Image (spheres, rainbow, N blue to C red):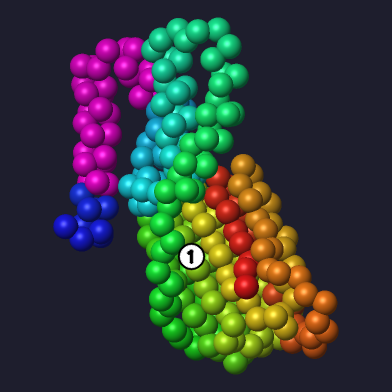
Amino acid sequence: MNEKRRISLSYGLLCLGLGGLWLLDTMGHLPWQISDYVFSWRFLMVVIGLFIVIKNNRSVFGLLVLAAGLIFSATYFWELPEGWEDYLPPIALMVVGAILLLKPSGERKKFNTSDVNVLNRATIFGDFKHQVTSVLFKGGYLTAVFGSNLVDFTKAHLGADEVFIEITSVFGSNAIIVPDNWDVKLEITSILGSSDDKRIITEKVIEKEGTLVIKGTVLFGDFRVKD
């Protein structure tokens, strides 16, 4: 079974299960304890974690969200020993370390290529890799919801002294690769997420072509600028 088919079947089974629980609750056949749990933030964390892990079973973020949802779910159904929450930070750190150690080095990513002057892309539960070769790039937007976008601008040129891109990451990841002669200005609001410029800073003097201004919002996701 190929990867896309596996993901499609997993999403389908998950949606069928959620729909079944909702139908049982609507018909009044779901015990109130279960109904109260299903329509709670604890169960929402479990569902979100499952969606992310199905998309990428080695996603550290997805596994942590799923684990947190299961732990908080346990507190709903059972009374845990006093002081149990003190064990969460070291266990979470150990889980992240184990996942990073076991994660294989992937193959070099392959990009589709186009010379579009405006790039507008919304990715939902998917993976988008693209290289822009436009000589007059004028901006656009990148949206990732439970998915990822990776755009390479190293062969592109700015069409103005200042070009704007709108970024939205909701439980997803956006990343761009830019040439050395582009200045980058981040104006991003991060809510339980991260936005970083990961490029290596050098002392080499380079004549700048212009500035790429990144605006937008990151919610439970991330945005990165890298080499």
16 lies above or below 87 = below
Quarter of the picture holding the C terminus: bottom right
Check the image and name the residue furthest to the bottom.
Answer: 135
The quadrant in which residue 89 appears is top right
Check the image and name the residue furthest to the front.
Answer: 101
State yes or no: residue 149 in magenta. no
Q: Which residues are magenta?
A: 10-39
66 lies above or below 115 = above
Magenta portion: prevailing SS class: helix
Residue 59 visible from this viewpoint: no
142 lies above or below 54 = below
93 lies above or below 29 = below
Q: Position of residue 38 (x, y in %)?
A: 35, 24
Question: Which residue type does callout 1 highlight?
Answer: Asn
Residue that appears at 68% across and 68% down: 199
Name the foreground residue: 127 vs 83.
83
Task: Indicate the secondary structure of the residue bearing disc 1.
Answer: strand
Q: Position of residue 68 (x, y in %)?
A: 48, 30
Residue that appears at 38% across and 17% down: 36
Residue 151 visible from this viewpoint: yes
Q: Is residue 128 left or right of residue 177?
A: left
Residue that appears at 56% across and 65% down: 175
The quadrant in which residue 32 appears is top left
Residue tagged by mark 1?
A: 149
Quarter of the picture holding the N terminus: bottom left
Residue that appears at 69% across and 63% down: 197
Q: Position of residue 92 (x, y in %)?
A: 53, 33
Check the image and name the residue furthest to the left.
Answer: 1
State yes or no: residue 29 in magenta. yes
Name the foreground residue: 85 vs 194.
85
Q: Is residue 11 left or right of residue 79?
A: left
Q: Is residue 121 left or right of residue 161?
A: left
